[in-house]
Image: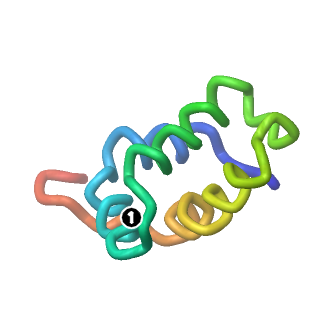
Amino acid sequence: MEIDPDALRHLISHRTEEIEEYVSGTGYLPRTVIGVATFFLDNDGNTDLLTAKQQVTFARFLKPLLEARPRQQAGDD
């Protein structure tokens, strides 16, 4: 799994509303998804260190959000 760490950092730092909306109604908590992303970044993107559940969380929520174009926010240029 090839993930741009800068894009992932941006997602969990500046696009948290999108994460909240994406996980809404799924039974997952936004902080769980952000936690998986943080763990992934803290371990230099080593997917082998993710548990099976973390890999599912990553694939279900983070990967689609990274592949989607971020919404334009007011004041973004």
Name the residue located 72 percent from the left edge and 25 percent from the top edge: 43
Look at mark 1 in the image and give the residue it sits on.
70
User: Would you place residue 74 above or below residue 50 in this image?
Assistant: below
Where does the image place residue 30, in percent across and percent down from the top left? 38, 52
Residue drawn at (70%, 54%) of the image: 53
- Can you give x and y, in whole percent of width and height, for residue 5 in the image? 62, 39
- Helix, strand or loop at mark 1: loop
x and y percentages locating residue 55 in the rendered image: 73, 54
Q: Residue furthest bottom?
A: 25
**Callout count:** 1
- Residue 25 position in % (x across, y down): 35, 75
The front one of 66 and 75 is 66
Q: Is residue 36 left or right of residue 31?
A: right
Q: Which of the 4 image quadrants contains residue 40?
A: top right
In the displayed structure, would residue 25 be above or below residue 44? below
Please tell me in which quadrant of the rendered image residue 64 appears: bottom right
- What colour-coding does the image apply? rainbow
- 23 shown above or below 54: below
Q: Residue at x 13, y 52 (%)?
A: 75
Residue extending furthest toward the front:
27
- Residue 48, above or below 3: above
Q: Residue at x 33, y 63 (%)?
A: 18
Amino acid type, callout 1: Pro
Decide: few, some or many residues near mark 1? Use Cα within 10 Å; few <14, some 14-19, many ≥20: few
Tell which of 77 and 10 is nearer to you.
10
In the rendered view of the protein, which quadrant contains the N terminus?
bottom right
